[in-house]
Image (tube, rainbow, N blue to C red):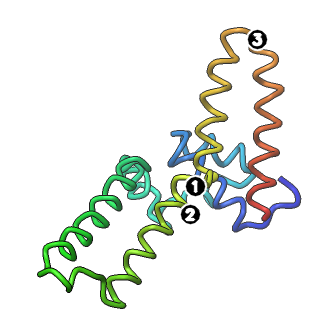
Amino acid sequence: MAGLTNQQKREWAEQLITQQGLSQKEAAEKVGVSTVTLNKWYAKYKWEDLKQSMLVTRQMQLKRLYMQMDELNSAIMNREKGKRFADSKEADTLSKLAGTIKTMETEASIADVVEVSKRFLDFLRGFSPAKAIEIAGLFDDFVKHLLKR
């Protein structure tokens, strides 16, 4: 994969392993690194742990953020009348939670792109395996493009 830095290759391999479930050997071949290099990255960056943490979905993360926001708002509203407003620290926390929620709800991550790509290719294989292979190459190029940003 000429043109990609080692860091970009590592990030791509991480996505392939943690999001798509590719083996270390498959990811090494796709990204264009040796299996020895990929095995080192796997251990050093604790990708096994990352694979497990991916079980916590975006929806679950959003639910937790909304719960935190609700709990803070409830605590503020439970104060005596006339004191039901956020102090500067609480207001900052509410603002940060709202910003994080907005980002998570509106921006597609590379993981999202990879997941949608995978699902679309699975769908397309049922109709046209040859077209799926062609489109898979385009999706790979698109992911590389996103990694270069």
User: Reading the chain from its start, which is encountered first: label 3 or label 1?
Assistant: 1
User: Reading the chain from its start, which is encountered first: label 2 or label 1?
Assistant: 1
- Asked if disc 2 and disc 1 are in contact, CB closer than 8 Å, the reply is yes
- Distance between the Cα atoms at labels 3 and 2? 35 Å
- Distance between the Cα atoms at labels 2 and 1? 9 Å
Name the residue: 66% across, 10% down: 126
Q: Where residue 97 is drawn, which disc sits there?
A: none
In terms of depth relative to the viewer, which is nearer, 139 or 98? 98
User: For the view shown, which residue lies furthest in the top direction?
Assistant: 127
Q: Quadrant of residue 141?
A: top right
- Distance between the Cα atoms at labels 3 and 1? 28 Å
Name the residue: 43% across, 57% down: 50
Q: Where residue 41 is drawn, which disc sits there?
A: 2
Q: Can you give x and y, in whole percent of width and height, for residue 31 in the image?
A: 72, 50
User: For the view shown, which residue lies furthest in the bottom direction?
Assistant: 88
Q: Where residue 14 is drawn, which disc sits there?
A: 1
Q: Is residue 144 left or right of residue 98?
A: right
The residue to which callout 3 is attached is: 128
Q: Inspect the image, locate mark 3, and give the three-letter code of the amino acid beneath it.
A: Ser
In terms of depth relative to the viewer, which is nearer, 33 or 115? 115
User: For the view shown, which residue lies furthest in the right direction?
Assistant: 3
